[in-house]
Amino acid sequence: MSFERRVIAFADRFLADRTFELVVLPALADMQFDEEAGRRSRVANRLAVLRAVAGGLRDDVRRDSASLLKVTLLSAAYFMYPLFFGFRYFKTWSEFFVVTTIVLALSTVPVLVCYWPARRAARPVD
């Protein structure tokens, strides 16, 4: 599998369509142009593409993290509610905090299952 195909496969799975079209595709086009013109080395061109992909991923995560955090906190509050009413059944604070940590960790599972993006068909590679 070529470098371009790997970048496209990663971007298709983890980046938004807008980020793919505005960041990754131009970076790949610049890489091809620079390689044909012999301006920079192959490694420098590939690092530039990887920097573009990392920047696009950072922007996507920053843009969507607030809504994901809100849904995760809602799920955690839902599962913590009965735990607080059963507080008197714990003998020590450490038992309570261990169970609380487990419940908080497990409360992220429904969020990830429900909001994980669906797989899309692979994009054609030129």
Image (cartoon, helix red, strand yellow):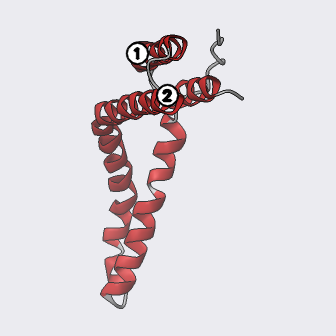
Q: How many marks?
A: 2
Q: Indicate the amino acid at tag 2.
A: Ser
Which residue corresponds to the image point at 32% horizontal and 38% vertical from the top-left? 65
Q: Quadrant of the N terminus?
A: top right
Instruction: Tell me the distance, in whole angstroms, between the alpha carbons under discs 1 and 2.
Output: 29 Å
Q: Residue furthest bottom?
A: 91
Q: Position of residue 28 (x, y in %)?
A: 50, 17
Amino acid type at circle 1 is Arg
Disc 2 element? loop
Where is mark 1, residue-wise? Answer: 18
Q: State which quadrant residue 107 falls in.
A: bottom left
> Which residue is at the front of the view, 21 or 120?
21
Are there few (<14), some (14-19), or many (20+) residues within 10 Å of tag 2?
A: few
Viewport quadrant of the C terminus = top right
Mark linked to residue 41:
2
> Which label is found at residue 102?
none
* Snapshot quadrant of residue 91: bottom left
